[in-house]
Image (cartoon, rainbow, N blue to C red):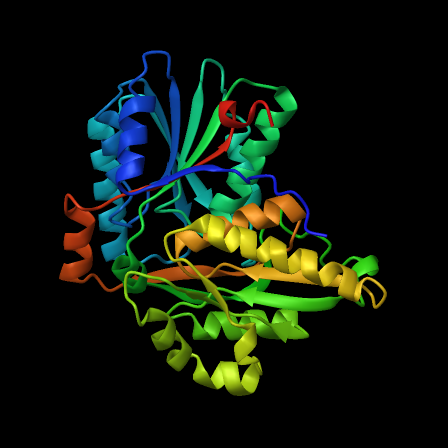
Amino acid sequence: MLRKLKWDPCVWHREQETDVFINEYFSCKNRRVLLIAGAGFDPRATAFCQRLLSVTSSVRAYLIQEERPDPVNALIVRANNNIIEFKKHIPDLKLEPIDIFDKDNAVIGGRNIVKAISQQSLDGISDVVVDISAMSIGICFPLIRYLIERIAKTALPINLHLFVMPNAKLDESIIPIAGDTVGCVHGFRGKWALDESANSAKLWLPQLAFGRRQTLQRIYDFVAPDDTCPILPFPSTRPRLGDELGEHYLTELESTWEVDPRNVIYAAEDDPLDLYRTVLRIDDLRRPVFEDFGGSQLVLSPTGSKILALGALMAALERELPVVYLEAIGYEYKATTSAVNQQNSSDAKFSHIWLAGDAYSNG
């Protein structure tokens, strides 16, 4: 039996709908906003901040500066320029450096962001807005989980919103340098490594993207799944993107991962709820099939676009699914004119998910 979903219906917007929502919702005089955003080199870092401030000045900013060893100087310059831009617009601002790795190269970013944000007061705040456009998965997933749990435990009358600026060309120009340590994202272990799930049938759901072959292969070796269902974007702004990714990963799909073509998951590139519902539907269908044979365990690896990553995040939160990830030790940024122009153009749009608060007060 398919179970009722937590975020169905869900309040979400994209493109022009998001613009209308921002104008109508945040222009209300009783809104007091805490904006949490990444303060890295990503050209999208300041875009939502500027958009939000075009309708309200009641904004306090908490900026996360992800610190990795030996960063490229050009990226440091870009990050510093973004911070200067933030300071131009928001006087009430806190910049929080977060170490992603410990001295022994252990991944500690998730724990560090939860510890840091727990010290922040939410008194007087009506809306917490998280812009994940310039955040890594290892930071934004634990951050969002903590905020949901904190708001729920304290019964604070606070709304939680997620925003992201999709830009496929820009995503492809930012290449993570794979680290050595594969593991579960902080707060997203699920039943991973528990005795009760030792004999469960593991189904791995990796999100395919260009420039992630080494990363995905290391995750595959770590997970050692019984089956793999790769996630491809379709429909997408580039009609052949799914085909191009399939060709890019042809060796893995046919030989290493031995994927049956019928097991490929197609998820709408601009709709996180499409993937969210698909993952939970797969979970519901597998549970009765494997319950007498050790159970079923879905393992998520969101290594592509942030929009689809939000769908994976919602599914993982609802069903306590493990999220296995390889944290980047650094990044290469191959800036292209078309990507930057798309970023800076008036056509650049945001997607929004209202994750908790007034919209679900009767649910």
Q: Nearest the camera: 13 or 1?
A: 1
**352 shown above or below 225:** above
Residue at position x 24%, y 32% from top? 51
Q: Is residue 362 left or right of residue 73?
A: right
Q: Nearest the camera: 111 or 159?
A: 159
Residue at position x 58%, y 52% from top? 185
The quadrant in which the C terminus is found is: top right
**Quarter where residue 164 is shown:** top left
Q: Position of residue 291 (x, y in %)?
A: 81, 62
Residue at position x 66%, y 52% from top? 189
Q: Is residue 221 left or right of residue 50?
A: right
Residue at position x 31%, y 46% from top? 165
Q: Position of residue 176 (x, y in %)?
A: 39, 63
**229 shown above or below 274:** below
Which residue appears farthest toward the front when viewing the image?
1
Q: Position of residue 75 (x, y in %)?
A: 27, 54
Query: Is residue 323 in view?
Result: no
Q: Position of residue 154 (x, y in %)?
A: 62, 20
